């Protein structure tokens, strides 16, 4: 017996150790961001003191296992606070992390003689990027899935305790439970999913998106159908092989831009194998942290030097209005033709709160692309329809979404989707949406009628005295396709009532086409026209203050107009639209004029014109969405906008007094230079081929108010010059803080430099000089009118102040002659102009 025990005990000891040695600790989990609750890719997962580690996938998931005893598991990622959690050995378990972002601080770096290996890798990546740039493919098509979510953030405990927020607080508490113990959930205000087939022809710069499914909920849209038009791939083309990569239409310099070495520092962090590609991990940092540049990581393939994946962000230090930080994460794969294409992209934009007492917002976008086909272009006719929608695009069932999503919704996302309907109906939320809509659109909706615009409520001029005006328009509650709009105005000095009434019909939405009819009886400044058919354009800085105050003050050259018109407009093809208008305008000048032999000098002279107008506009990359009965433009910052107009005056038709022809063309474009800022340029030229009253000739728009206006002459007086053939140019360069960001006392103010120059030259033919003799206006000599400006913008995020200097027509003789002909007006060489504008 003792002999058996002697052999059994050692045998049991050895067997136990073998079994223990074969045991494993297997840990799975997900790493999410504490603020946004979205998955964090490329995070490092490892055991303390060990050599075993892994990296999270694009959704933030990980799996790690070990046969060595460890008591803790760690997560770390540059830009986030590291975190550790305890583990239980010898069992399979799930451990999730929520990590918080922190300022990016680079520790000490040892610099050795010789070439920085990271710089060598980056130089090769810059040299090879044209081979990998997907924009160089002849064509590309793929299946795209896009998910977007917008949440209200920065909700304090003090806010939650307010009684009028009880309904909202109950929802937050439910989401907090799903979010986890380390994080507070955000209140969802919109979520959407969209599945599309996307076709791009880079040769002809054409694109088509066939939308197969949309699931969208939005608290604030007047018509939720507009959201589906915003959820495609149009706003997610983050291509770092280009020199500039924009976020919110603001250009940032790519870490592999042609001139990137002048603005970035690079550090080689590690090398690893990703999807069978050996990659170098490069840390990229702007040399000046306030420059418009990215901070983060690139994974660049060995020997071929293509970007395999990236994790790049914008920090709080960057001069970027209302954005605390932004992050772009992307995984790319090679195509058979050479260029690399993105298969997964995640974008997070964390908007700043205006004050500590106000909430902010977080936008998250996830995009997955698959089944790429390259260099098999479609016929040009295929791209005539830019966007198409399947008949059941809005009615796909839950089974479709479960089978189609590249990744399942998290429990928090699913609950947020269901909660939006409840949020929408909370009185506090509804009222906040209505206030924002009023400030943005200028109209207050009352059932099927919108009343406004508040910017036109008051004006003052020499003839009417104080003037009040109230307008209205119908909305989608009244009709989806019929629009009635108009206004009534009253002048207290002339005791006259003025009005406008127009009826419009949306004929088709894809392509957009509309017809309208109008009658208007009102007073205008000469040289201005009423905009009877316009779209809301979010891509343009409005001249709201200038437009409002240009109707207040010493405005004396006025005309009374009775206008009748009918028009038809249509999108002819992608980027090309046209409008045909027939109008009759009966004009009564409210000041003494003289026109040729037809009218007597110093008497009120009525005349009538009948015109046929053809307006054509080409804007290839402009993006529109339809919200109810309104069409909204998101602007065009990447290609020129070309507009042409031809006007034919028809004598005797509807009592027209004149027969004439005139035409003009304008071209505008934005030249984007990333860190160096951007230039906005507009050139306009035209000619009048006949003799007509000078009120119908070209009168460059001046500015006698104290408020700055874009694409007008800010030191030219109203109605100062007249011409029948002309050319005008407007230029502004916005430095985006290039200089001020480097001055210690100024860089914290986030102010930005802007300079500009405007020029106009026009002549008046002999026949129109004779026909319009004895009137008070100026004809330019051989010298063009010119002005320059220098200013500061982004003061308190919205204020702009410019010093404007007039370069020509400033001699004493000209000023004296002008003052004699225009009582109460004078010419000044310089002035200060203030404006309100918002740019990111």
Image: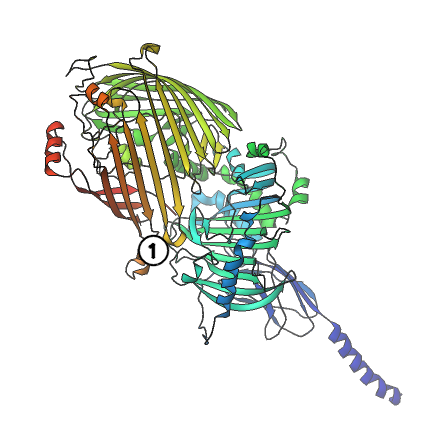
Within the image, what quadrant is residue 375 found in? top right
Instruction: Estimate how packed mark 1 is, as few (under 14), some (14 to 19) or many (20 or more) residues with alpha carbons within 10 Å.
Output: many
Residue 838 visible to an observer of this rendering: no
Viewer-proximal residue among 538 and 488: 538
Q: Position of residue 619 (x, y in %)?
A: 45, 35
Image-based side of 20 in relation to 27, left or right: right
Identity of the residue furthest to the right in this view: 1
Q: Position of residue 665 (x, y in %)?
A: 36, 31
Viewer-proximal residue among 184 and 352: 352
Q: How is the image coloured?
A: rainbow
How many labels sit on residues?
Answer: 1
Image-based side of 407 in relation to 606, left or right: right
Q: Position of residue 162 (x, y in %)?
A: 42, 47
Which element carries disc 1, helix, strand or loop? loop
Q: Quadrant of the N terminus?
A: bottom right
Is 238 located above or below residue 104 in the figure? above
Within the image, what quadrant is residue 207 found in? top right
For mark 1, what is the residue?
738
Is 27 located above or below residue 539 in the figure? below
Q: Position of residue 282 (x, y in %)?
A: 52, 64
**In percent of the image, x 35 and y 41: which residue is there?**
681
Residue 694 visible to an observer of this rendering: yes
């Amino acid at each position: 017996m003792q002999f058996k025990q002697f052999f059994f005990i050692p045998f049991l000891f050895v067997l136990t150790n073998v079994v223990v040695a074969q045991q494993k600790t297997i840990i799975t989990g997900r790493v999410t961001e504490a603020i946004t609750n979205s998955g964090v890719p490329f995070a490092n997962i490892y055991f303390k003191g060990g050599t075993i580690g892994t990296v999270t996938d694009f959704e933030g998931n990980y799996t790690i296992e070990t046969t060595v005893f460890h008591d803790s598991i760690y997560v770390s990622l540059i830009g986030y606070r590291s975190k550790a959690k305890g583990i239980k050995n010898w069992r399979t378990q799930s451990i999730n992390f929520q990590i918080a972002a922190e300022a990016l601080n680079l520790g000490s770096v040892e610099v050795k003689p010789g070439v920085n290996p990271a710089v060598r890798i980056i130089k090769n990546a810059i040299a090879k990027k044209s081979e990998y740039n997907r924009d160089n493919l002849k064509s590309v098509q793929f299946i795209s899935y896009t998910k977007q979510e917008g949440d209200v953030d920065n909700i304090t405990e003090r806010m939650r305790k307010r009684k009028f927020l009880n309904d909202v607080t109950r929802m937050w508490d439910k989401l907090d439970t799903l979010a986890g113990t380390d994080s507070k959930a955000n209140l969802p205000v919109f979520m959407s999913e969209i599945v599309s087939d996307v076709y791009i022809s880079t040769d002809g710069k054409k694109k088509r998106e066939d939308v197969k499914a949309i699931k969208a909920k939005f608290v604030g849209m007047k018509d939720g159908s507009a959201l589906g038009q915003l959820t495609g791939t149009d706003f997610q083309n983050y291509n770092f092989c280009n020199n500039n990569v924009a976020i919110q239409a603001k250009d940032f310099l790519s870490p592999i831009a042609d001139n990137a070495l002048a603005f970035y520092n690079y550090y080689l962090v590690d090398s690893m194998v990703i999807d069978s590609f050996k990659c170098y991990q490069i840390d990229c940092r702007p040399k000046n942290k306030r420059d418009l540049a990215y901070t983060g990581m690139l994974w660049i393939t060995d020997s071929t030097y293509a970007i395999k994946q990236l994790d790049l962000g914008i920090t709080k230090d960057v001069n970027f209005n209302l954005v605390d930080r932004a992050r772009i994460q992307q995984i790319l794969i090679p195509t058979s033709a050479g260029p690399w294409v993105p298969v997964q992209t995640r974008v997070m934009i964390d908007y700043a709160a205006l004050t500590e007492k106000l909430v902010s917002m977080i936008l998250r976008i996830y995009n997955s692309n698959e089944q790429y086909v390259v260099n098999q272009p479609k016929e040009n006719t295929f791209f005539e329809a830019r966007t198409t929608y399947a008949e059941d695009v809005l009615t796909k069932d839950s089974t479709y979404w479960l089978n189609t999503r590249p990744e399942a919704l998290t429990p928090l996302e699913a609950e947020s989707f269901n909660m939006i309907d409840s949020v929408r109906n909370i009185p506090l939320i509804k009222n906040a949406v209505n206030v924002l809509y009023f400030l943005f659109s200028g109209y207050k909706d009352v059932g099927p009628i919108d009343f406004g615009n508040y910017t036109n409520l008051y004006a003052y001029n020499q003839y009417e005295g104080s003037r009040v005006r109230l307008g209205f328009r119908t909305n989608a509650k009244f009709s989806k396709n019929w629009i009635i709009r108009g206004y009534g105005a009253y002048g207290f000095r002339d005791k006259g009532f003025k009005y406008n009434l127009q009826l419009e019909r949306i004929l088709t939405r894809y392509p957009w086409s509309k017809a309208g009819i109008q009658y208007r009886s009102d007073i205008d400044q000469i040289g201005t026209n009423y905009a009877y058919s316009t779209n809301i354009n979010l891509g343009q800085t409005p001249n709201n203050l200038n437009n409002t105050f240009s109707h207040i003050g010493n405005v004396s050259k006025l005309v009374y107009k009775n206008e009748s018109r009918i028009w038809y407009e249509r999108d002819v093809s992608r980027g090309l639209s046209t409008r045909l208008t027939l109008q009759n305008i009966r004009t009564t000048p409210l000041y003494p004029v003289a026109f040729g032999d037809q009218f007597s000098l110093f008497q009120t002279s009525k005349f009538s014109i009948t015109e046929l107008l053809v307006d054509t506009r080409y804007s290839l990359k402009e993006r529109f969405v339809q919200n109810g009965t309104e069409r909204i433009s998101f602007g065009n910052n990447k290609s020129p906008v070309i507009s042409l107009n031809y006007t034919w005056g028809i004598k005797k038709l509807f009592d027209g007094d004149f027969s004439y022809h005139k035409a003009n063309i304008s071209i505008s474009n934005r030249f984007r230079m990333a860190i160096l800022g951007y230039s906005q340029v507009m050139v306009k030229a035209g000619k009048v081929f006949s003799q007509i009253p000078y009120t119908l000739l070209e009168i460059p728009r001046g500015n006698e108010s104290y408020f700055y206006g874009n694409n007008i002459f800010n030191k030219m007086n109203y109605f100062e010059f007249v011409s029948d053939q002309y050319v005008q140019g407007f230029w502004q360069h916005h430095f985006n803080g290039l200089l001020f960001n480097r001055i210690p006392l100024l860089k914290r103010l986030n102010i930005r430099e802007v300079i500009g120059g405007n020029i106009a030259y026009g002549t008046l033919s002999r026949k129109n000089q004779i026909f319009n003799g004895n009137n008070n206006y100026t004809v330019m000599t051989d010298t063009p009118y010119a002005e320059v400006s220098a200013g500061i913008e982004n003061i308190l995020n919205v204020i702009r102040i410019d010093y404007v200097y007039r370069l020509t027509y400033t001699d004493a003789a000209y000023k004296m002659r002008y003052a004699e002909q225009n009582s109460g007006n004078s010419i000044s060489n310089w002035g200060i102009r203030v404006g309100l504008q918002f740019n990111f």
